Amino acid sequence: MSGVHKYPTISFRVSPRERDEIEAKITASGMQKKDYFIRSCIYNRVCVVGKKEVVYRLVEELQMMQMNLIDIVSQFEQQEVTLSTEGIKEMRNDCLSMLKAIMWMLDGARYLWQETEERKEKSPDSSNC
C-alpha cells in the first residue's frame, strides 16, 4: 500500500544555520541522511545538564519498570504467568531500551561526579597549593 510505512517517523525543526551544519556533516560522512541521523542519535555522546525535570522523568520510568518487574516476579513465584511470551519480550525490550538510555545519559553526566586528575591537582584544598 502506498503511503503506509512499517515504522514511525521522527521529525524535528532546526534553524537554517543548524540545517546547513547538519547537511555538511551528512555530506562529509558519505552516509544517507537516515543512517546519519540514526547513528548520530544512538552513538553520539551527549553532555547532560542536570535538571530536576529530567531526573523526575527517569525516576518515574524506573518506578514503572520496578512495578512491572515486581508483578512478573510475583507471577513467576505463583506459577501463574498471565503475560504472553510476546508480552514478556516486549517488556524486556522496553526495559532494555530505557536502561540503555539511562546508562547513556549517566555516561554523559559523568563529569558531574567524577573528578579528573587535572581538577584534583588544581583543587585549592589539595596539598599541591
Image (cartoon, rainbow, N blue to C red):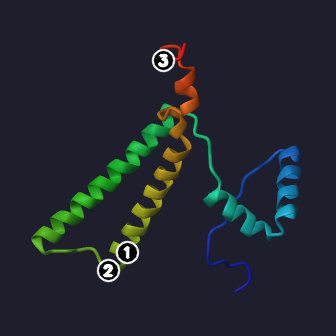
Compared to residue 85, the image places residue 92 above or below, namely above
Decide which of tag 3 and tag 1 comes sooner along the chain. 1
Give SS at disc 2.
helix
**Residue 126's mark?**
3
Residue visible at 27% across and 54% down in the picture: 67
Residue type at numbered disc 2: Thr
Of marks 3 and 1, the one in the foreground:
3
Of marks 2 and 3, the one in the foreground:
3
Compared to residue 79, the image places residue 99 above or below, namely above
Q: In which quarter of the image is the C terminus?
A: top right
Residue type at numbered disc 1: Lys
Would residue 31 be found to the left or right of residue 78 on screen?
right
How much space separates mark 3 and mark 1, taking CA atoms? 51 Å
Q: Which one is nearer the viewer's eye here, 10 or 105?
A: 105
Residue visible at 40% across and 61% down in the picture: 95
Total numbered badges shown on the rendered structure = 3
How much space separates mark 2 and mark 3, taking CA atoms? 57 Å
Outermost residue toward the bottom? 1
Decide which of tag 2 and tag 3 comes sooner along the chain. 2
How much space separates mark 1 and mark 2, taking CA atoms? 6 Å
**Residue 85's mark?**
2
Residue 11: x %, y % from top left: 71, 58
**Residue 89's mark?**
1
